[in-house]
Image (cartoon, rainbow, N blue to C red):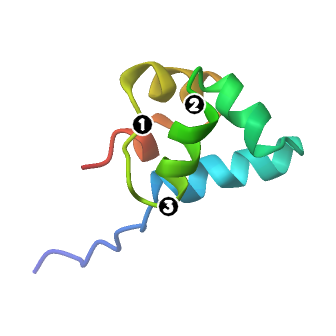
Amino acid sequence: MTPHKNKIKLPSVLDAIEFRRDQYGWTKTKMAKELHIGNTHYSDFLSGNRHLPLIAIKHAYRIGVPATVLLQL
């Protein structure tokens, strides 16, 4: 019998990005700028109405959001 593997539940992309924003002490406006998206797009992302474009995902990785979180399906 194969031992049971415990899967680690990854945080959502939103939770990971907000965690990083909190760690850096950035405002939502500053985070939007760092992700290279507009404030409205970032607000829509936070409310679940929009996804992040590829450029924002690349910049989220650059500021320390793990690729495993950003690329989860």
Instruction: Decide: is 56 above or below 65.
Output: above
Judged left or right of residue 29, residue 70 is left
Q: Which mark is residue 52?
A: 1
Q: Residue at x 69, y 24 (%)?
A: 34
Q: Residues within 10 Å of mark 2 (few under 14, many from 20)?
A: many
Q: From the viewer's perspective, is the residue at label 1 or at label 3 nearer? A: 3
Q: Residue at x 25, y 78 (%)?
A: 4
Q: Which residue is mark 3?
A: 47
| 3D distance between C-alphas at marks 2 and 3 | 18 Å
State yes or no: discs 1 and 2 in contact (Cβ < 8 Å). Answer: yes
Q: Residue at x 78, y 32 (%)?
A: 30
Of residues 68 and 5, the one drawn nearer to the viewer in this rendering: 68
Which numbered disc, 1 or 2, marks the residue that appears first in the sequence? Answer: 1
Instruction: Decide: is 55 above or below 13.
Output: above
| Residue at the extreme right of the image, as rendered | 25
State the image coordinates of residue 62 (x, y, percent, origin top left).
62, 21
Q: Residues within 10 Å of mark 1 (few under 14, many from 20)?
A: some
State the image coordinates of residue 39 (x, y, percent, origin top left).
63, 36
Q: Which residue is mark 2?
A: 60
Is any part of residue 63 visible from this angle?
no
Q: From the viewer's perspective, is the residue at label 2 or at label 3 nearer? A: 3
Q: Residue at x 45, y 18 (%)?
A: 55
Instruction: Decide: is 33 above or below 10.
Output: above
Kind of residue sitting beneath label 3: Ser
Kind of residue sitting beneath label 1: Leu
| 3D distance between C-alphas at marks 1 and 2 | 10 Å
Secondary structure at badge 3 equals: loop
Q: From the viewer's perspective, is the residue at label 1 or at label 2 nearer? A: 1
Which numbered disc, 1 or 3, marks the residue that appears first in the sequence? Answer: 3
Q: Quadrant of residue 48?
A: bottom left
